């Protein structure tokens, strides 16, 4: 029996106007894959991610998460999303540990966290190397530290799929290297990772699969094959829509 893909986009087309931003995209991401979506600015990467997460509905085709229609998917504990420049409101006096505990809310609802829940929170902090920052306000962290905290929140929720939208924008080179080391470890543990990334060297050095996009897919395959192909030149030479 074939396992249901974690992400399944089938013949997806979408446009904010009459002109498609992405056109006839078919992509599946299986459990345990470590994949990146790359392409020039305006190529439709973020739109593709929103369609995969059910934040947008395709004009044509279908988008499914864990086998269910993405637009109506409501099993939030299976999904962890880290946005570009993830942050908390500066006026909110919230600590890193309090951010991470939010990952337990889909499991506990409005009831308080149990001892076991707090152990899961602290274990998530330890996994991302943020235990020493647990009581620091989230707004006092560097960009790289903040992204680690939001990954810890996803881990505390026991997410099976981790989706990251350009998570290293504005993060210094040393922190980027450390951040990708963390993703490598999480991938080795079996978490499915799908990310949009502008840093092509980081992508090709770490991910297993590259999806190169500019309205349509120019390449979808192993990172080492992507490096040797002309897909990047062709994608960046194509006309970007939005």
Image (cartoon, rainbow, N blue to C red):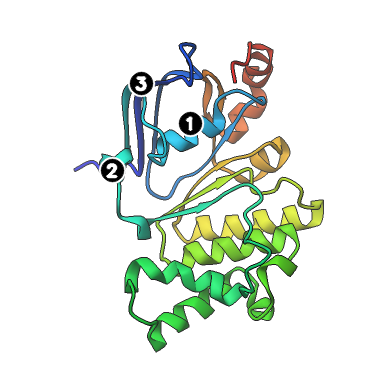
Q: Earlier in the sequence, mark 2 or mark 3?
A: 3
Of the 4 image quadrants, the one containing the C terminus is top right
Question: In percent of the image, x 59 and y 56: which residue is there?
Answer: 183
Secondary structure beneath label 2: helix
Binning the other alpha carbons within 10 Å of mark 2 as few (below 14), some (14 to 19) or many (20 upward) gives few
Q: Are marks 1 and 3 in contact (CB under 8 Å)?
A: no
Q: Nearer the viewer, residue 152 or 184?
A: 152
Residue 126 placed where, x, y %? 59, 76
Q: Which mark is residue 72?
A: 2
Binning the other alpha carbons within 10 Å of mark 3 as few (below 14), some (14 to 19) or many (20 upward) gives few
Foreground label between 1 and 2? 2
Residue 169 placed where, x, y %? 72, 45
Q: CA distance from mark 2 to mark 3?
A: 16 Å
Q: Are marks 2 and 3 in contact (CB under 8 Å)?
A: no
Whether 93 is drawn above or below 223: the answer is below
Question: In percent of the image, x 36 and y 26: which residue is there?
Answer: 58
Q: Nearer the viewer, residue 101 or 195?
A: 101
Is residue 211 visible to the viewer in this orientation of the structure? no
Residue 178 placed where, x, y %? 71, 59
Whether 96 is drawn above or below 114: the answer is above
Is 185 on the left or on the right of 25, as rendered? right
User: Which residue in the protein does label 3 denote?
Assistant: 59
Residue 25 placed where, x, y %? 42, 22
Secondary structure beneath label 1: helix
Question: In percent of the image, x 30 and y 46: which residue is there?
Answer: 73
User: Which residue in the protein does label 1 denote?
Assistant: 48
Q: Nearer the viewer, residue 210 or 126?
A: 126
Whether 170 is drawn above or below 228: the answer is below
Whether 153 is drawn above or below 161: the answer is below
Is 143 on the left or on the right of 148, as rendered? right
When asked about the image quadrant of residue 179, the answer is: bottom right
Is residue 201 visible to the viewer in this orientation of the structure? yes
């Amino acid at each position: 029996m074939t396992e249901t893909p974690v992400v399944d986009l089938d013949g997806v087309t979408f446009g904010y106007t009459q002109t498609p931003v992405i056109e006839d995209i078919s992509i599946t991401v299986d459990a345990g894959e470590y994949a990146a979506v790359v392409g020039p600015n305006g190529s439709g990467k973020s739109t593709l991610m929103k369609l995969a997460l059910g934040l947008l509905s395709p004009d044509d085709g279908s988008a499914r998460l864990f086998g269910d229609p993405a637009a109506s998917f409501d099993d939030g504990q299976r999904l962890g999303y880290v946005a570009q420049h993830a942050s908390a409101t500066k006026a909110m006096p919230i600590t890193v540990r309090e951010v991470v505990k939010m990952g337990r809310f889909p499991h506990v609802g409005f009831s308080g966290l149990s001892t076991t829940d707090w152990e899961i929170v602290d274990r998530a902090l330890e996994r991302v190397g943020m235990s020493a920052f647990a009581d620091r306000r989230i707004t006092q962290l560097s960009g790289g530290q903040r992204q680690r905290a939001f990954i810890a929140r996803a881990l505390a929720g026991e997410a099976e799929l981790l989706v990251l939208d350009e998570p290293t924008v504005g993060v210094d080179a040393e922190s980027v290297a450390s951040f990708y080391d963390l993703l490598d470890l999480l991938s080795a543990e079996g978490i499915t990772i799908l990310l949009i990334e502008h840093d092509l060297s980081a992508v090709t050095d770490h991910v297993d699969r590259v999806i190169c996009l500019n309205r349509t897919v120019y390449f979808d395959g192993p990172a080492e094959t992507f490096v040797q192909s002309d897909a990047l030149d062709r994608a960046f030479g194509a006309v970007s829509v939005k």
